Amino acid sequence: GAVVSQHPSWVICKSGTSVKIECRSLDFQATTMFWYRQFPKQSLMLMATSNEGSKATYEQGVEKDKFLINHASLTLSTLTVTSAHPEDSSFYICSARKMGLLSYQETQYFGPGTRLLVL
Amino acid sequence: AQSVTQLGSHVSVSEGALVLLRCNYSSSVPPYLFWYVQYPNQGLQLLLKYTTGATLVKGINGFEAEFKKSETSFHLTKPSAHMSDAAEYFCAVSDRGGGTSYGKLTFGQGTILTVHP
């Protein structure tokens, strides 16, 4: 398999501050990464698609000015939660798409997640 | 638009018993289908996937799933449950290719598997 890391694994911050979460593909290059949000006892909801060297594509209802995504290299994407509020508290998970020679050979590998608590 | 329905938010089995987790999907195009497992406070690990070819797919940890197009189903099974199988399982579907939805995963609601001694 392939390894995707996230940092930090958990973070507590005060309301109004910004928090940056990193997602790295450790042993492969990923032109595309995805950011998900998971509420307790619920499924994963896709927030945005992060594309290396271009702007992220946000899902409907996700505020792009609040959740800033930067994919500056083929192994790193960052999600910055700006002016965080308690309702932003959640489990954030990233995935990185590893391509194959053929489209059906691609696989998404998930990071371990980052738990954010905004006080 | 794609959607995934997992029947049963909780499934409980005895150790050694058959595990059956149900997944039905809706997709306007032939999909790719996935099963992921999530242990507490961790990310998702791919169990298996169906993309093309044989409809019975074998994955890690003894799990397998069968793609049944006529039933739009992709149920996950394991002949004999282990205590270590206790986790949450997610079925997911993605677009086969092309368009803005390419590669995006749509997840089901998840099924929590409990294994009793």
Image: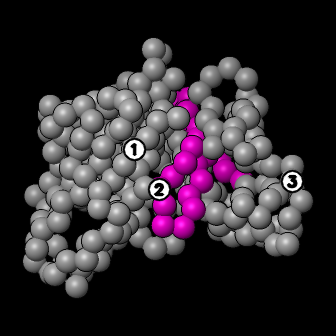
Kindly identify the residue that appears in the image at 48 percent across and 61 percent down: B42
Extreme residue toward the top, this view: A101
Residue B67 in which image quadrant: top right
User: Which residue is tagged 2?
Assistant: B43
Query: Judging from the image, what secondary structure is the residue with disc 1 in?
Result: strand
Query: Judging from the image, what secondary structure is the residue with disc 2 in?
Result: loop
| Crowd rating for badge 1 (residues with CA inside 10 Å; few <14, some 14–19, many 20+) | many
- Quadrant showing the C terminus of chain B: bottom right
Q: Of the residues shown, which amino acid type is indicated by label 3?
A: Ser
On residue B20, the disc is none
1 or 2: mark nearer the eye: 1
User: Which residue is tagged 1?
Assistant: A4
Extreme residue toward the bottom, this view: A119
Name the main secondary structure of what is drawn in magenta.
Answer: strand
**Alpha carbon separation for disc pair 1 and 2:** 10 Å
User: Which residue is tagged 3?
Assistant: B80
| Crowd rating for badge 3 (residues with CA inside 10 Å; few <14, some 14–19, many 20+) | some
Q: Is residue B64 magenta?
A: no
Given the image, what chain letter belongs to the residue carrying mark 3?
A: B
Image location of residue A50, percent across then percent down: 25, 41
Say whether marks 1 and 2 touch (CB < 8 Å).
Answer: yes
Left/right placement of residue B32 relative to residue B8 reads left
Given the image, what chain letter belongs to the residue carrying mark 1?
A: A
Kindly identify the residue that appears in the image at 33 percent across and 53 percent down: A6
Query: Judging from the image, what secondary structure is the residue with disc 3 in?
Result: loop
Kindly identify the residue that appears in the image at 57 percent across and 62 percent down: B39
Is residue B25 among the parts visible in the rendering? no
Left/right placement of residue B106 relative to residue A94 reads right
Q: Of the residues shown, which amino acid type is indicated by label 2?
A: Gly
Q: Is residue B27 magenta?
A: yes
